[in-house]
Every structure is written in C-alpha cells, then in structure tokens.
Image (spheres, helix red, strand yellow):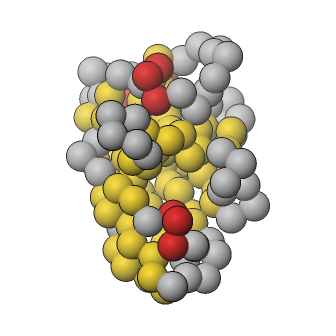
Amino acid sequence: QVHLVESGGGAVQAGGSLRLSCSASGSSSRHYVIGWFRDDSPGRREGVAVIDLDDTTTYADSVKGRFIISKDNAKSTIYLQMNNLKPEDSSMYYCAARPAGKVAEPLLFALFDYWGQGTQVTVSS
C-alpha cells in the first residue's frame, strides 16, 4: 500500500508559478508509477502528468510546455512544477500511484489505485 500526501497548492495570478509536492510512503512506494491529476467533470479526474519508473514522462496536451513532473527518489517525493498558469488550471490537484507496467493510456485516472487528499490551486486572471 502507498500513502500519498500533497502540498504546495495556493492562489496565484495568471502567468505565475507553483510547485506541488507529493510525498510517498509505504512498502515499495518507489515501485509505483506516480501521476498528477485534477478534478474535471463530476466523478472524473483529468490526467495532468505521469512519471514512470524509468523517468519517462507523459503530459496532457493542455499543460505541455508549461508543467514539469519530476521525482527525487532519495526523498520519495514527486514534484509538479507549474509555470505560466492560466485560470483554467484552477482545480483540486491530486497525486496518485499505480503498480508499474506499460499501459495504453498513461493518464487514465481509473488505472490508479492510491490517491492523496488533494491540494487546491486557484489562478486568477
């Protein structure tokens, strides 16, 4: 089982930056693929970025060139650097974990088993 705790959310103006952190703990947490998601329509979450065990990254088209996902294995922490934020980026952001393995849709939220409690990001125009 993996326990995830997000931090770093807040309120910024459009064009600003935030860095979200996801602290992972639990048995074999380093053997999990970690992703960042945000609330979309009710009951659904949009995949924002995912980082695999080999550091391969996948991004949603809406954030490519603006967001960067990275990890520090020594600290068991996964980061989401968000630059040039837009009002439409406002949402609750979650990190999530799934067992390693190649999947057809890396950003699909239904594939992820473990979730943090979320951190709110608000971008004003």
Residue drawn at x 60%, y 38% is 51
Instruction: State the count of labels.
Output: 0
Residue 74 makes an appearance in the image: no
Q: Position of residue 89 (x, y in %)?
A: 51, 64
In the image, 33: left or right of 64? left
Residue drawn at x 45%, y 82% is 124
User: Is 122 situated above or below 98?
Assistant: below
Residue found at the far front of this picture = 41
Residue drawn at x 26%, y 34% is 3
**Toward the viewer: 46 or 27?**
46
Tell me which corner region of the image, top left, top right, bottom left or bottom right, holds residue 102. Answer: top right
Q: Position of residue 45 (x, y in %)?
A: 43, 39
The quadrant of the image that shows the N terminus is top left
Residue 37 makes an appearance in the image: yes
Q: Position of residue 55 (x, y in %)?
A: 67, 37
User: Is 118 situated above or below 34?
Assistant: below
Q: Position of residue 121 (x, y in %)?
A: 39, 67
Tell me which corner region of the image, top left, top right, bottom left or bottom right, holds residue 84. Answer: bottom right
User: Is 94 situated above or below 85?
Assistant: above
User: Is 96 situated above or below 39?
Assistant: above
Residue drawn at x 75%, y 61% is 65
In the image, 101: left or right of 92? right
In the image, 73: left or right of 62? left
